[in-house]
Image (cartoon, helix red, strand yellow):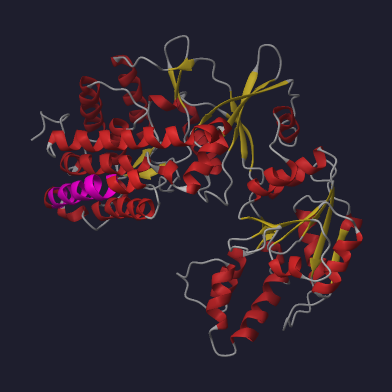
């Protein structure tokens, strides 16, 4: 195929650059957060706003061009195009100089330099031909250039390009967060979906070619495994005896949390503890990582010694506290109000859905129970931690999504713990409660009691631990009852189907099962009457 791509705000992402340059120039407050479009609307409302915006554009596309990044998913798309023999043309509306740019930076030269730094022209990477890069002075000139190549499709972030009277009758793909009323324009807000819609799902045998760009050993076989969480997972065979694990993380445009980088950093931090796989290689643009293959099986029958292994790992993890690692865990809960805000945000998103059964559960079961639980928890929670965050000295290292659902049982009986995508510092109470409440865990009451006693022993230096846990236990349960309902949200379901395509055909049954899980959690809290049943020895 002959594929045409726009450049600015389609391949090159300037969101952070616009924000940082606007702050440097004092155009917005330092704490301002927003994307390029939001910034444009904000500045254009000011006096002489159009000129202010144009001057900022001149700075970003000129002297600050090298601060731009590839949009998530672009690297994978370009690598696959090269692998499959598609020809890429980059056609951009870009003038010679930027508006009001006193430095007289050549915008086109800056763009080429940036492409060069990103590996666009390297034969062992994207292999795009320099002769296939074109810049136009006007939109009309750009459209005529597109028309001249008889392309199969074109990707652009501006709908007006496709609406130009001279635009050819080819497939139109709009990369945008907005909407379109035109049926012949396909709209996507991330490159993973653009990739699937234009060149199809990636096949297993293609994965080894992508891996070859970051790993020197030859891959002789690829097997896709059942998705773990929201990532695609592959077993790559090096030879008959040796294998490695490939994780293909969700598109960062869909989920902005840097899961790959977090997991790689976490595994490197804990490597010497001997309970996690080793990192072999990773690639940020492709959002993939390679890990040591752990031979073993999932843990189906949990025994007491498995609880002990989990406790021993958590205890050894805290021995690393002196290490230079200050990143908070994903969705860390460092105060009572922060926990309640997270619950409220999840509730607000779910209540907007149109599913009748879900709304009925949220309005008549969840909301009244949350009100009752919060009234009781707020009264008993340590007052110095209701709104104020837990001091850093009391925060602990947490794998966050920790449990036997993310563990491999080796032949010798040892457990290896996987999936540290959400790793970071957190309140130990969250680690304690999540282990008990996680729907993927099948613990009996005695095992839950052993876990609570063991973690209190590990984190016993924290004077407010027991009181916080008692107050937080039902709130974390309610939080989990909302987490299991993520599939009712469009982006939540997108993440799940990215990890396992077969789920697309099981949507209705999946939703019904998740709602049953949420109701069961609420029932457990109601039956317990606010009292944690695993802390009878702690008054």
Q: Could one spot residue 375 in this view of the protein? A: yes
Residue 442, given in percent of the width and then of the height, sits at 32, 23
- What residue occupies the far top of the structure in this picture? 412
Among the 4 quarters of the image, the one containing residue 532? top left
Between 416 and 438, the one lying in front of the other is 438
The residue located at (45%, 69%) in the rendering is: 31
Q: Is 378 on the left or on the right of 102, as rendered?
A: left
Between 323 and 504, the one lying in front of the other is 504
By secondary structure, the bulk of the magenta-drawn segment is best described as: helix
Between 291 and 322, the one lying in front of the other is 291
Between 237 and 78, the one lying in front of the other is 78
Q: Quadrant of the C terminus?
A: top left
Task: Look at the picture and state if 151 lies above or below 207.
Answer: below
Residue 402, given in percent of the width and then of the height, sits at 38, 32
Residue 522, given in percent of the width and then of the height, sits at 23, 38
Q: Could one spot residue 24 in this view of the protein? A: no
What residue range appears in magenta?
Answer: 361-378
Q: Is 472 on the left or on the right of 236, as rendered?
A: left
């Amino acid at each position: 195929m002959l594929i045409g791509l726009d450049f600015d705000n389609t391949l090159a992402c300037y969101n952070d650059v616009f924000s940082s340059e606007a702050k440097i120039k004092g155009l917005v407050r330092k704490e301002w957060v927003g994307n390029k479009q939001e910034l444009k609307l904000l500045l254009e409302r000011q006096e002489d706003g159009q000129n202010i915006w144009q001057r900022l554009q001149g700075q970003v596309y000129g002297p600050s061009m090298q601060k731009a990044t590839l949009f998530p998913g672009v690297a994978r798309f370009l690598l696959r195009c090269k692998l499959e023999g598609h020809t890429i043309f980059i056609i951009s509306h870009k003038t010679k100089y930027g508006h009001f740019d006193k430095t007289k930076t050549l915008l086109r030269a800056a763009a080429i330099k940036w492409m060069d730094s990103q590996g666009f022209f390297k034969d062992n990477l994207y292999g795009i031909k320099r002769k296939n890069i074109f810049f136009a002075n006007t939109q009309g000139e750009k459209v005529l250039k597109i028309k001249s190549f008889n392309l199969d499709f074109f990707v652009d972030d501006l709908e007006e390009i496709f609406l130009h009277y001279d635009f050819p009758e080819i497939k139109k793909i709009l990369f945008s967060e907005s909407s379109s009323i035109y049926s012949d324009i396909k709209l996507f807000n991330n490159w993973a979906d653009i990739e699937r819609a234009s060149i199809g799902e990636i096949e297993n045998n293609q994965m080894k070619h992508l891996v070859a760009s970051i790993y020197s050993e030859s891959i002789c076989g690829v097997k896709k495994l059942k998705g773990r969480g929201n990532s695609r997972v592959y077993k790559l065979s090096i030879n008959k005896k040796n294998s490695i694990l490939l994780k293909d993380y969700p598109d960062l445009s869909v989920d902005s949390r840097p899961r790959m980088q977090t997991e790689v950093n976490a595994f490197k931090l804990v490597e010497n503890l001997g309970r996690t796989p080793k990192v072999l290689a990773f690639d940020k643009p492709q959002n993939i990582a390679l890990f040591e293959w752990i031979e073993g099986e999932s843990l189906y029958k949990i025994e007491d010694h498995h609880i002990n292994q989990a406790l021993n790992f958590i205890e050894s993890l805290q021995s690393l506290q002196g290490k230079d690692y200050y990143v908070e865990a994903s969705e860390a809960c460092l105060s009572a109000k922060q926990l309640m805000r997270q619950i409220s945000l999840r509730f607000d998103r779910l209540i907007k859905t149109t599913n009748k059964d879900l709304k009925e559960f949220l309005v008549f079961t969840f909301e009244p129970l949350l009100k009752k639980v919060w009234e009781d928890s707020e009264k008993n929670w340590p007052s110095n931690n209701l709104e104020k965050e837990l001091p850093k000295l009391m925060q602990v290292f947490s794998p966050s999504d920790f449990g036997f659902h993310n563990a491999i049982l080796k032949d010798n009986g040892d457990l290896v713990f996987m999936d540290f995508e959400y790793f970071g510092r957190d309140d130990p109470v969250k680690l304690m409660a999540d282990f008990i409440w996680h729907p993927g865990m099948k613990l009996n009451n005695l095992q839950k009691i052993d876990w609570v006693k063991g973690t209190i022993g590990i984190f016993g230096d924290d004077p407010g631990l027991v009181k916080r846990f008692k107050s937080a236990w039902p709130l974390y349960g309610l939080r989990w009852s909302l987490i299991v309902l993520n599939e009712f949200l469009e982006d939540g379901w997108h993440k799940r189907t990215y990890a396992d395509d077969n789920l697309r055909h099981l949507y209705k049954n999946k939703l019904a099962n998740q709602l049953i899980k949420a109701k069961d959690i609420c029932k457990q809290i109601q039956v317990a009457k606010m009292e944690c049943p695993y802390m009878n020895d702690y008054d």
